[in-house]
């Protein structure tokens, strides 16, 4: 008993001494250094990915806290998955308009980012639609856990972002025929999504189908595609604005960049323009099929309609109409899936050649898109003026100076309205074409090829294409 009591007293005394020493100076009169403070906890983070999925919207700037974080973002683009400290952020999306103007189309709005959440912000819908329409342009914000995807797995989230498409069923299967009775991954309408699913990496086939009287009518078929391990994919069905009958294509964001999946049967569209002023009417021969010309008897200055062909490489020969031996153009042409291409026979007959133009007929609701091609070999360099109707060109700088034979302006963004187009010999007031009054509309796409005078005349003119054409009136040139 005495032993136990003595032990207790000694222990108590030791604690008391230790307590006294902890705040007392050492024998040298200084205090021992304080222990370092614990490190601050790491900041809580969130991630954000932004996708431009509105087919009739212009390029946009994305502003965070008033500063441009991503500039000049086009349709079918997606930002990388970006890590931010969790909290509140002011977000704004500005449309880029003609004349380098800006218009806020989303926000500014406050986006509250919670810790460990990934935010997918998609711009979807039609800018041209009424604001109260179900198809109207606006943001779709989807949240999902922020997590590391295992190396052998793929996380996929599918979004219906095509206002032109009805409610559809989505099937994701092994490559091959769609099994009878196969249940869809999900069913959704525009603006809806299917919750994220995690699947093993490997080859899959994605089909989008519309149900009709119990039958699945496939309107999009990806063919076999490889989903790589570790990927975090956001797949958005968007309107198909190129060649082919499929109403949609798939915009795939992998967290670093974006790419497009087209229907496996997507063709290529091609048209031919005869712009060689002294050449006779011509036949267009594809892959040496002289027995059945692709186009027959095309005169100057006529443009064909677009024709859909299987994507691939073709040999194109142009001959005098009905004379297979008189080959004046022999060119190999690559026609990619989904693309539209104009093949123009240009130059005088002695130097005739094929000029290939890449077409993009996607209409943008906030502007008119106008392209001019110099296809008049006798004109040389010219200046192109675009002015208010009746204003004339005196004292006005040309919109396109020193525009030479075979030059292509690309698609210019203009405000909708009426304009006079005047073409002069470069550096002079000598008018070669015009003034021609044009009326262009929002969402319209307009192409024109400057041509030499018609046989027996002195006036240069324009071969009109796309929305310049007057439906049912057969107007193809001026």
Image (cartoon, rainbow, N blue to C red):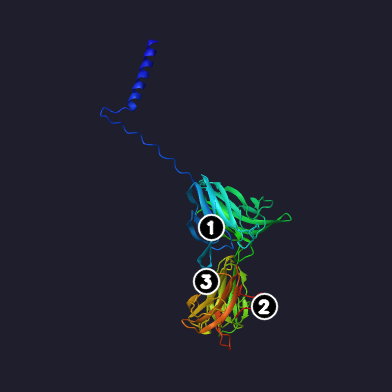
Look at the numbered discs 1 and 2 and tell me whether their residues touch, using CB distance below 8 Å.
no
Look at the numbered discs 3 and 2 and tell me whether their residues touch, using CB distance below 8 Å.
no
Residue 70, how many percent across, how many down?
49, 58
> Which residue is disc 3 drawn over?
410
Q: Secondary structure at mark 2?
A: loop
Instruction: Report whether residue 287 is seen.
Output: no
Q: Residue furthest left?
A: 28
Residue 436, how many percent across, how many down?
58, 79
Specify whether 299 is left or right of 11.
right
**Front one among 30 and 203:** 30
> Which residue is disc 2 drawn over?
473
- The residues tagged by marks 3 and 1 sit, at their Cα atoms, a distance apart of 26 Å
Decide which of tag 1 and tag 2 comes sooner along the chain.
1
Q: Nearer the viewer, mark 3 or mark 1?
A: 1
Q: Nearer the viewer, mark 1 or mark 2?
A: 1
Instruction: Report whether residue 23 is seen.
Output: yes
- The residues tagged by marks 3 and 2 sit, at their Cα atoms, a distance apart of 27 Å
Q: Secondary structure at mark 3?
A: loop
> Which residue is disc 1 drawn over?
93
Q: Residue furthest right?
A: 213
Mark 1 is surrounded, within 10 Å at the Cα level, by few (under 14), some (14 to 19) or many (20 or more) other residues, namely many
- Image height of 146 relative to 96, above or below: above
Look at the numbered discs 3 and 1 and tell me whether their residues touch, using CB distance below 8 Å.
no
- Image height of 138 relative to 318, above or below: above
Residue 335, how many percent across, how many down?
56, 69
């Amino acid at each position: 008993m005495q032993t136990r009591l003595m032990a207790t007293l000694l222990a108590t005394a030791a604690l008391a001494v230790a307590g006294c020493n902890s705040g007392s100076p050492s024998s040298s009169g200084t205090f021992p250094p304080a222990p370092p403070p614990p490190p601050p906890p790491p900041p809580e983070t969130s991630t954000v990915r932004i996708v431009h999925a509105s087919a009739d919207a212009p390029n946009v700037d994305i502003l965070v806290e008033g500063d441009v974080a991503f500039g000049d973002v086009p349709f079918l683009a997606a930002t990388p998955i970006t890590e931010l400290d969790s909290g509140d952020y002011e977000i704004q999306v500005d449309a880029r308009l003609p004349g380098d103007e800006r218009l806020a189309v989303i926000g500014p709005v406050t986006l509250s980012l919670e810790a460990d959440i990934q935010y997918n912000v998609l711009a979807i819908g039609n800018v041209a639609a009424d604001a109260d329409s179900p198809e109207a342009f606006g943001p779709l914000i989807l949240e999902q856990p922020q997590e590391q995807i295992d190396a052998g797995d793929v996380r996929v989230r599918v979004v219906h972002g095509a206002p032109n498409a009805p409610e559809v069923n989505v099937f994701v299967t092994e490559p091959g025929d769609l099994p009878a009775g196969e249940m869809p991954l999900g069913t959704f309408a525009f603006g809806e999504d299917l919750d994220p699913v995690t699947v093993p990496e490997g080859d899959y086939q994605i089909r989008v189908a519309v149900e009709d009287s119990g039958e699945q009518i496939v309107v999009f078929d990806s063919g076999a595609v490889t989903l790589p391990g570790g990927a975090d994919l956001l797949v958005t069905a968007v309107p198909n604005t190129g060649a082919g009958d499929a109403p949609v294509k798939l915009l795939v964001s992998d967290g670093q960049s974006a790419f497009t999946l087209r229907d496996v049967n997507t063709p290529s569209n091609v048209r031919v323009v005869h712009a060689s002023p002294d050449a006779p009417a011509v036949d267009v021969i594809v892959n040496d099929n002289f027995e059945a010309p692709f186009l027959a008897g095309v005169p100057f200055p006529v443009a064909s309609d677009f024709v859909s062909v299987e994507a691939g490489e073709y040999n194109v020969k142009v001959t005098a109409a009905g004379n297979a031996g008189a080959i004046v153009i022999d060119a190999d042409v690559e026609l990619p899936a989904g693309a539209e291409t104009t093949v123009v026979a240009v130059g005088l007959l002695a130097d005739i050649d094929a000029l290939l133009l890449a077409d993009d007929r996607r209409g943008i609701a906030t502007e008119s898109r106008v392209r001019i091609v110099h296809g008049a070999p006798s004109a040389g360099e010219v200046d192109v003026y675009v002015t208010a109707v009746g204003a004339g060109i005196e004292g006005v700088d040309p919109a396109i100076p020193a525009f030479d034979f075979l030059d292509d302006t690309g698609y210019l963004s203009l405000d909708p309205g009426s304009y006079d187009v005047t073409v002069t010999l470069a550096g002079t007031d000598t008018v070669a074409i015009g003034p021609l009054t044009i009326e262009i509309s929002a969402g319209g796409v307009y192409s024109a090829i400057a041509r030499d005078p018609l046989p027996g005349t002195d006036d240069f003119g324009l071969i009109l294409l796309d929305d310049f054409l007057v439906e049912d009136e057969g107007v193809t040139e001026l």
